[in-house]
Amino acid sequence: MSAHVRVRPDALERIGIAQGLTSRYKLAKRLGVSPSTISRVLDGEQLPGNAMIALTLEKLEVSFYDVFEIARTNNGAAA
C-alpha cells in the first residue's frame, strides 16, 4: 500500500474565488506557479509537488485538509 497527496479541485477553486482569484491564471499568479501547472493539477493530470503544497498553504492561508487529501493505493489501484 502506498499513498500520495492530491488536490481537492472543487475546494481549491472555491477558496480561490472567495479570495478574488476568479481564474486559474490569477490562482497561479498568487501561488507563483505556472498556469499550466495549476490546470494539470486541477484536472487530475499531475499530483501537486511539495513546493505547490507549501505555497498553497502559505499564500492562501489555508490548512492542509482544506485543499488536499491523502489518496491511498493498493496493488496499484487508486482507492
Image (cartoon, grey):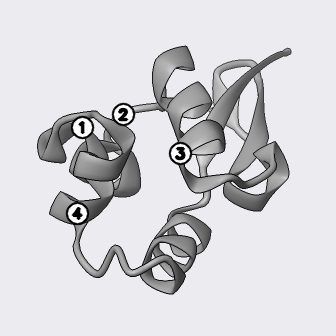
Q: Assess disc 4: are there few (<14), some (14-19) or many (≥20) residues with their C-alpha within 10 Å of its C-alpha.
A: some
Q: Nearer the viewer, mark 2 or mark 4?
A: 4
In the image, taking residue 50 as reference, residue 67 lies left or right, namely right
Instruction: Quarter of the image for the C terminus: give it.
Output: top right
Q: Amino acid at mark 3?
A: Lys
For the residues labelled 4 and 3, say whether their Cβ atoms are less than 8 Å apart. Answer: no
User: Is disc 2 placed on a helix, strand or loop?
Assistant: loop
Q: Nearer the viewer, mark 1 or mark 2?
A: 1
Q: Which mark is residue 46?
A: 2
Q: Nearer the viewer, residue 24 or 26?
A: 26
Residue at the image point whose x is 61% and y is 59% from the top:
8
Q: Which residue is mark 1?
A: 37
For the residues labelled 1 and 2, say whether their Cβ atoms are less than 8 Å apart. Answer: yes
Q: Amino acid at mark 1?
A: Thr
Q: Which residue is mark 3?
A: 59
Mark 4 and mark 3 lie on one chain; the one further toward the N terminus is: 4
User: Is disc 4 placed on a helix, strand or loop?
Assistant: helix
Residue at the image point whose x is 57% and y is 74% from the top:
15
Q: Amino acid at mark 2?
A: Gln
In space, the residues marked 4 and 3 are separated at their CA atoms by: 12 Å
Residue at the image point whose x is 74% and y is 18% from the top:
75
Q: Assess disc 3: are there few (<14), some (14-19) or many (≥20) residues with their C-alpha within 10 Å of its C-alpha.
A: few
Q: Residue 41, image x and y in percent?
A: 37, 44
Please say if 51 is above or below 31: above
